[in-house]
Image: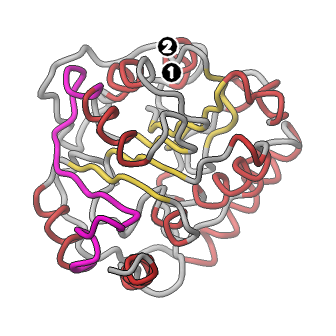
Amino acid sequence: MGLFKRRTKARIKWRGDTIAVEEAISRELETVRAATPDNPTLHGFKVFSQCDEDGILAHLLALLPEDSRTNTCLEIGCGFGLENNTHHLLLQGFRGVWVDADAQHIESIHAALGASLDHPASPLRVTQCFVDRDNIKPLVADSCAFLGTEEVDVFSLDIDGNDLWVAERALECFRPALVIVEYNAKLRPPLSRSVRYEPRRVWDGRGDYQGASLSAFVEHLDGYRLACCGISGVNAFFVRRDLAEYVPSTGYSTELLYRPMRHPFCGRPGGHEPTLGWLRDVLDERVAAAGG
């Protein structure tokens, strides 16, 4: 769920045919397996992500050397926290920073997580900020100071507009191992295009003039290699170039790793309606362990 989505998703409900969608995903994965047998997309699953991002992240992190891991994450465009790319990581002991422009999203998270969120020992910081190319560097610097490292494991960016320009600027000041960005799958490789930069750009959810193509991200994210795309054709995963040797799929071409948009796969069922209850317990336990 993006940083500037107009629609409110206080509750995430699935209205599709669950069996038909899962069968379609299975067929799509067979196509992926035949063309790219080392593709991390084959390991995807959903817990709190939109589609299969939780599983892809778990697989990619497992491939990286243990001594390179910091168990930290930064997500810009966290939404209500109910459906994003790092909620599952926080349940596994990660420290993280969530950022979103929508005051309602941030207020809802604070209300659900309680006093432990504001305790100094909390493993999560939640910040309201409309992110642009000018404020991304101080935001990243402040987030890295909280996390205690400039080499976070996961940087996820979804701001529905200036994503390419903000991501490019952000990566000038820190070195995440993995980067997740939302790409415009309508623009297939090798077409490399992005919307023009406008500081207050907000996509209204209509029309195809939004974001950037996959090839544009591949060209502009200097120092990173494309590892895979999610099965729904929404998110692309990049690995830092010095770690690419541990991820075999970085040897495939952009054309092979590209996945077309599959709207029915977005928001696939993931069990009961998501809440922040498990994360609240984790924060309370971490604070209590610290003597809070």
* Residue visible at 47% across and 73% down in the picture: 16
Quarter holding the C terminus?
A: bottom left
Residue under label 1, please give it: 217
* Residue visible at 74% across and 44% down in the picture: 67
Residue 243 location in percent, x, y?
A: 74, 30
Residue under label 2, please give it: 220
Tell me which amino acid carries mark 2: His
Q: Secondary structure at mark 1?
A: helix
205 or 53: which is nearer to us? 53
Tell me which amino acid carries mark 1: Phe
* Residue visible at 54% across and 76% down in the picture: 270
In contact (CB < 8 Å): disc 1 and disc 2: yes
Question: Is-magenta flag for residue 3?
Answer: no
Left or right: residue 179 compared with residue 64: left
61 or 186: which is nearer to us? 61
* Residue 228 visible at all: yes
Depicted 214 relative to depicted 79: above or below: above
Quarter holding the N terminus?
A: bottom left
Residue 148 location in percent, x, y?
A: 45, 44
Question: Is-magenta flag for residue 134?
Answer: yes
* Residue visible at 17% across and 77% down in the picture: 111
Q: How many marks?
A: 2
Boundaries of the magenta span: 112-137
Residue 91 location in percent, x, y?
A: 52, 72
